[in-house]
Image (spheres, rainbow, N blue to C red):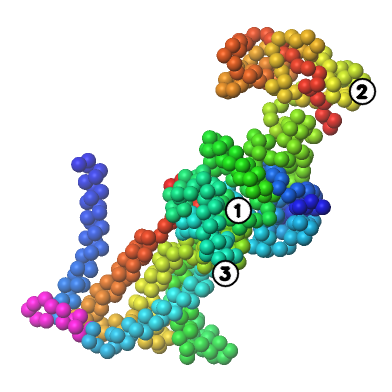
């Protein structure tokens, strides 16, 4: 084996250890709830706690609503930007990065202050939480959809469909969306992963969710928060697995011209 | 009134405050008869694709009207024009099979399933790919993809077929094959077609008429033979085919006598200008021959390069102030001149013409 190859493997090994060691440690810690031997009692406790199912159910609901709102906002917007105003793409991209620039706490207080009283009294409904999650997931959803649209020749495909008699709705649902399937799914599952574990917004807006539940659990129990962390990792990985599995069957991918 | 009329159409693009307005097409007029194949030929940026896109409905004319069968369609959305289009980038829907691509327009038009299936089969037969209906676009070669794109555009029986540089992305051999195929299908179906290209050979070989465009305007409209042999402007003359341009002086305008350096020759083309005035004389390389010929003009120069191009041999002769290109048809018995040799080049008086605008 060449010396360069050996070093590559050493670097990969160090990376894997750095990534997996804390996970293994967390998992082993979560198994030590029973004195003297390893067992799943922390997991049993977590799954039997009514708070787990209800809080996870709430987060699931917020995630689904966020995904729907995000898709309705981001996909047509990014499609329109690609098709009609491509020169505005950097502006939209910059706007999508706001959650990285503005801390979640600042954003939460800003939203509460703006929408606490009429005419925008949204605080009493989950709409504000969903709106905040849409903003939070914007960089991921935007980038996924944007990358998908950049991989296909949106303008030519749209024009080809139009010349065959298709209206805007048909173009979107029969031509653009099917070719963005993998990109949209990436955005969907990233959004899902973010919303499921989110703490700041849910806590400050005082809505039940999985994030605040995990923190609460950490304040009163020792091994169960570790079990919850492992469960949330498994859920995230399962989501990524679904992306891979669904994307596997996408025919043609993004090719518009030329021979593969 | 013709089948398709483009009446005084212009297209301006606003480039923002800094760049002002760009005129892409200016006062374009053209009448196309039913079943005709007309090519728009010109260099990049001459407005040919913009004009085509206005017919398709992807651009709206800033001024003028587009009439199809007497009906003004200038402001009609593209999906209601019943105009089929084939793109340079094929634009097949990657998520659909070949058959689904071809049937897409029929599905939009809500045709019965049986009719749709028959039409798709008919189209697959027309493009000679009856076995490939189940393939996806990525499983096809570039040439096959463009055939499918053509079949897809034709399946809906459009009123006009528009082809936007459909062969540009293909290699030379496939290009030649496919252009004959396009012409065959167009003639078989008798469909009115506009073909945009920057390739003069393509335009001249398949068109009923050619529109040569430059800087957003029409330079000349005519049959391929007329465009090549009787160019109306110096742009057409130099853009279509290879051309020798000689700066000459008028020796005797009435008798058509001209002088190049100290050598005199005659043209049968009308000459305007007083004695001593400068004019530009055009000569096609294939009209020139080596050696003095009786009753023909002759000029002498030194052979600079000899290039073998297969069917022809291109020889560049230094005539002092200009390099003159001579194209000799390749034959096994052809005697090629040596580089550096002094040679006489002859041509008949009718082969050279003087540009009016020069």
Any part of residue B172 in sight: yes
Secondary structure of residue under mark 1: helix
Residue pictured at 57% horizontal, 36% vertical: B176
Residue pictured at 23% horizontal, 64% vertical: A20
Q: In the drawing, does residue B346 fall left or right of residue B196?
A: right
Query: Which mark lies nearer to you, 3 or 2?
Result: 3
Query: Which mark lies nearer to you, 1 or 2?
Result: 1
Residue pictured at 37% horizontal, 60% vertical: A249
Which residue does the numbered mark 1 point to in the structure image?
A: B154
Point out the image quarter for the C terminus of chain B.
top right
- Which sits earlier in the primary sequence, circle 1 or circle 2? 1
Quarter location, residue A248: bottom left
Q: In the drawing, does residue B19 fall left or right of residue A22?
A: right
Q: Is residue A120 above or below residue B21?
A: below
Which residue does the numbered mark 2 point to in the structure image?
A: B274
Q: Residues within 10 Å of mark 3 (few under 14, many from 20)?
A: few
Which residue does the numbered mark 3 point to in the structure image?
A: A169
Inter-mark Cα distance, 1 to 2: 57 Å
Chain letter of disc 2 in the image: B
Inter-mark Cα distance, 3 to 2: 68 Å
Q: In the drawing, does residue B56 fall left or right of residue A38?
A: right
Chain letter of disc 1 in the image: B
Magenta-highlighted residues = A34-46
Give x and y (percent) for residue A6.
21, 46
Any part of residue A199 in sight: no
Give x and y (percent) for residue A182.
42, 63
Give x and y (percent) for residue A125.
47, 89
Secondary structure of residue under mark 3: helix
Q: In the drawing, does residue B138 fall left or right of residue B228?
A: left
């Amino acid at each position: 084996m060449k010396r360069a190859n050996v070093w590559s493997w050493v670097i990969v090994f160090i990376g894997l250890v750095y990534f997996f060691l804390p996970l293994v440690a967390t998992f082993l810690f979560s198994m030590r709830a029973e004195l003297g031997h390893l067992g799943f009692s922390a997991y049993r406790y977590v799954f039997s706690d009514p708070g787990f199912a209800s809080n996870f159910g709430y987060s699931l609901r917020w995630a689904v609503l966020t995904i729907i709102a995000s898709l309705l906002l981001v996909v047509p917007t990014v499609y329109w930007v690609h098709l009609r105003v491509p020169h505005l793409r950097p502006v939209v991209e910059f706007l999508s990065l706001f959650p990285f620039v503005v801390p979640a706490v600042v954003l939460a207080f800003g939203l509460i202050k703006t929408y606490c009283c009429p005419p925008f009294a949204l605080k009493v409904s989950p709409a504000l939480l969903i709106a905040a999650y849409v903003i939070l997931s914007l960089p991921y959803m935007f980038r996924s959809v944007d990358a998908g649209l950049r991989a296909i020749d949106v303008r030519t495909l749209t024009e080809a469909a139009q010349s065959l008699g298709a209206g805007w709705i048909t173009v979107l649902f029969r031509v653009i969306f099917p070719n963005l399937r993998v990109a949209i799914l990436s955005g969907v599952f990233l959004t899902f992963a973010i919303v499921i574990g989110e703490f700041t917004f849910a806590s400050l807006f005082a809505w039940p969710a999985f994030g605040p539940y995990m923190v609460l659990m950490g304040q009163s129990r020792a091994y169960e928060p570790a079990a919850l962390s492992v469960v949330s990792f498994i859920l995230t990985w399962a989501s990524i697995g679904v992306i891979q599995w669904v994307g596997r069957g996408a025919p043609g991918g993004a090719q518009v011209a030329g021979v593969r | 009134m013709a089948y398709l009329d483009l009446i005084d159409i212009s297209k301006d693009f606003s480039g923002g405050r800094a760049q002002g307005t760009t005129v892409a097409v200016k006062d374009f007029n053209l009448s196309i008869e039913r079943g005709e194949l007309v090519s728009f030929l010109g260099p990049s940026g001459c407005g040919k694709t913009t004009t085509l896109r206005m017919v398709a409905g992807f651009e709206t004319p800033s001024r003028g009207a587009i009439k199809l069968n007497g009906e003004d369609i200038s402001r009609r959305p593209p999906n209601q024009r019943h105009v089929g289009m084939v793109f340079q980038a094929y634009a097949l829907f990657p998520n659909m099979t070949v058959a689904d691509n071809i049937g897409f327009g029929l599905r939009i038009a809500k045709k019965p399933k049986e009719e749709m299936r028959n039409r798709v089969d008919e189209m697959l037969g027309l493009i000679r790919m009856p076995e490939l209906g189940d393939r996806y676009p990525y499983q096809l070669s570039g040439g096959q993809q463009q055939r499918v794109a053509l079949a897809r555009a034709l399946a809906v029986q459009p009123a006009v077929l528009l082809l936007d540089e459909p062969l540009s992305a293909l290699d030379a051999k496939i290009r030649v094959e496919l252009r004959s195929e396009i012409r065959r299908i167009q003639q078989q179906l008798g469909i009115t077609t506009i073909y945009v290209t920057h390739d003069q050979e393509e335009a001249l070989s398949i068109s009923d008429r050619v529109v040569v465009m430059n800087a957003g305007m029409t330079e000349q409209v005519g049959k391929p033979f007329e465009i090549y042999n009787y160019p109306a402007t110096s742009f057409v003359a130099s853009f279509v085919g290879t051309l020798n341009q000689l700066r000459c002086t008028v020796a005797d305008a009435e008798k058509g006598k001209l002088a190049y350096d100290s050598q005199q020759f005659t043209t049968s083309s009308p000459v305007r200008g007083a004695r001593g005035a400068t004019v530009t004389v055009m000569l096609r390389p294939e009209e020139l021959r080596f050696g003095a010929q009786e009753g023909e003009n002759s000029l002498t120069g030194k052979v600079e390069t000899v290039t073998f191009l297969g069917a022809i041999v291109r020889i560049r002769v230094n005539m002092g102030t200009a390099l003159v290109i001579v194209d000799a048809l390749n034959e096994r018995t052809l005697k090629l001149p040596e580089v550096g040799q002094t040679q006489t080049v002859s041509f008949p008086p009718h082969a050279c013409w003087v540009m009016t605008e020069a």
